[in-house]
Image: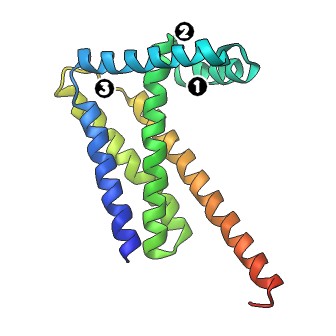
Amino acid sequence: MKRSFLILILILIWIGLVFYFSSQPPDVSGRQSGSVYKFLKKIDSVLDFTRTNWYKNLRSLLEKWWFPDKKPTGEDLVRKSAHFGLYFIMGILSFTFSYTYLRKYVFSILLGVSLPTLIAVLDEYNQVFHNRGSSLYDVFIDMNGALFGVVIALLILVVGRLITRTYNVHRGER
């Protein structure tokens, strides 16, 4: 019970963080993403990751997936990656909370995807009140982030259970 309460508090903090970012005026939001983009360019100047095949393939995939109608800038990719990342973590937290509390896989998967998607819809609606555009496509990216987070959390849970079960069988326990 203590663990699920702690995870619930983390979810609420994370939702607050999401709404904090979506409540920023357009110029502040632009500066924030611009700063992250410049930071990533500095890291790239040292590590030179943008010339790797892995990066080129990932960028091509994300451009097709997230920007089917236009050629995005590096800053566009940073902004959409932030959407994906925020909701990836929210998906993990929501799934973990539900599973810790109820121990039901299907319900935990559904909550892990649906709660972040609901927050994403409300987040996009909130942006309208701060002179920022809202986009159903951003909700799609957010939902995909949550879905990926749930899949990763589920895989970790299942693999952990298999390892524990195998370890217990080898020790003679059942």
55 left or right of 98 in image: right
Badge 2 element? loop
Q: Earlier in the sequence, mark 2 or mark 3?
A: 2
Badge 3 element? loop
Amino acid type shown at disc 1: Trp
List x then y, in percent, for residue 159.
70, 64
Relative to 117, say whether 101 is above or below: below
Q: Earlier in the sequence, mark 1 or mark 2?
A: 1
List x then y, in percent, for residue 169.
80, 84
**What is the distance, in whole Å, between disc 1 and disc 3 at their CAs?**
18 Å
Badge 1 element? helix
Residue placed under numbered mark 1 in the picture: 65
Q: Which mark is residue 134?
A: 3
Q: Which mark is residue 22?
A: none
Q: Crowding near pointer 2: few (<14 within 10 Å), some, many (20+)?
A: few
Residue placed under numbered mark 2 in the picture: 71
Residue at screen point 48% across, 66% down: 107
Residue at screen point 22% across, 34% down: 126
Relative to 94, say whether 56 is above or below: above
**What is the distance, in whole Å, between disc 2 and disc 3 at their CAs?**
20 Å
The image quadrant that residue 123 belongs to is: top left
